[in-house]
Image (spheres, rainbow, N blue to C red):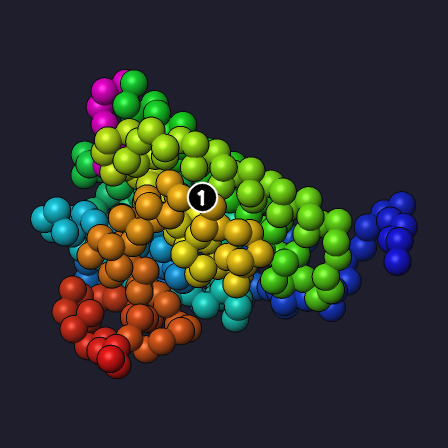
């Protein structure tokens, strides 16, 4: 069926498929509600989407390096329930997207996952080199991720997994782009251990929850469709990063779906991980 756009678009609140009840063409809060505040320096409001995982992995990596100032409370923000539209959340992020961070030591609000990674890297002086060439290469790949992931998530992922109907044109269009992006990564990683060179950086932390998850079959149930095994360098890189203990912990935080042994809905102390049920053999 061919769609003929009207002269002026109007919002049909029932149209939108999987995300119809939370997608809307206006900004601002839908309800009044203050956000909870815990005891730690950093207050995170998030959910374990790929963008949310970036930040919890970064925080766990910082704690693994012995930075006590990186202690954090991670409050689950159920985006499917519209919690990101509360007045308290909108005060931190007027764009109503997770993750959002408040640094209680200086009152800074930080929104957009890439901005949070950059803020934490600079605050704790790690995962981002001071050498201008190395720093720039890291930022090249960090910004590459933030320019590319919307095509993977909002493009391929949406039309392949979430759209109310399957249409050949958008699936083909965004499949081509997703595979092109995987090839970009694969060619880069043919000559490097990590995205920006020999060192693990915020570029890797940002990219692995998206493209690492994709090649490991953790996104959109699309590994076979995309023939991800052909991207051998991306798979090698993803396996190395996913084996990191801090990465494994970070993936669990603010997760409210999946196996009980792989999720920690809220994180307020390091000991919270000890209460996660063990996986059955």
Tell me if 69 is positioned left or right of 103 in this view: left
On the image, the x and y values in percent for residue 199 come to 23, 33
Mark 1 lies on residue: 231
Report if residue 76 is visible in the image: yes
Q: Is residue 68 above or below residue 122?
A: below
- Image spot of residue 279 (x, y percent): 26, 77
Q: Residues within 10 Å of mark 1 (few under 14, many from 20)?
A: some
Q: Is residue 88 above or below residue 149?
A: below
Identify the residue at image location x=63%, y=42%: 176
Task: Say if 42 sits above or below 108 in the image.
Answer: below
Quadrant containing the N terminus in the rendered view: bottom right
| Residue 114, horizontal then vertical, whole percent | 39, 41
Q: Residue at (36%, 76%) from the top-left corner?
A: 259
Task: Provide the major secondary structure of the magenta segment.
Answer: loop
* Residue 60, image quadrant: bottom left
Residue 93 in view (yes/no): no
Q: Residue furthest top?
A: 132
x then y, percent, for residue 243: 24, 55
**What are the residue bounds of the magenta stretch?**
127-132
Q: Is residue 231 left or right of residue 199?
A: right
Say which element carries label 1. loop
Residue sitting nearer the eye, 73 or 48: 48
Quarter holding residue 248: bottom left
Q: Does 80 appear in magenta? A: no
Quadrant (top left, top right, bottom left, bottom right) of the C terminus: bottom left
């Amino acid at each position: 069926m061919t769609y003929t756009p009207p002269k002026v678009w109007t919002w049909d609140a029932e149209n939108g498929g999987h995300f119809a009840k939370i997608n809307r063409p206006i900004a601002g809060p839908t309800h009044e509600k203050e956000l909870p505040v815990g005891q730690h320096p950093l207050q995170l409001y998030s959910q374990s989407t790929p963008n949310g995982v970036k930040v919890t992995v970064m925080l766990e990596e910082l704690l693994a390096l012995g930075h006590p100032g990186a202690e954090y409370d991670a409050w689950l923000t159920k985006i499917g329930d519209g919690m990101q539209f509360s007045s308290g959340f909108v005060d931190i992020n007027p764009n109503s997207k997770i993750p959002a961070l408040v640094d209680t030591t200086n009152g800074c609000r930080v929104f957009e996952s890439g901005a949070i990674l950059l803020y934490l890297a600079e605050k704790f002086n790690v995962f981002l080199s001071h050498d201008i060439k190395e720093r720039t290469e890291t930022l090249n790949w960090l910004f590459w991720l933030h320019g590319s992931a919307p095509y993977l998530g909002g493009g391929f992922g949406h039309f392949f997994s979430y759209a109310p109907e399957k249409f050949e044109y958008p699936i083909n269009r965004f499949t081509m782009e997703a595979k092109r992006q995987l090839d970009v990564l694969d060619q880069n990683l043919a000559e490097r251990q990590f995205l920006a060179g020999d060192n693990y950086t915020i570029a890797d932390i940002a990219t692995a929850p998206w493209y690492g998850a994709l090649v490991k079959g953790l996104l959109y149930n699309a590994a076979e469709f995309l023939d991800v095994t052909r991207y051998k360098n991306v798979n090698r890189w993803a396996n190395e990063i996913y084996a990191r203990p801090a990465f494994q912990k970070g993936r669990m935080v603010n997760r409210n779906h999946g196996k009980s042994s792989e999720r920690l809905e809220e994180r307020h102390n390091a000991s919270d991980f000890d209460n996660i049920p063990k996986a059955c053999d």
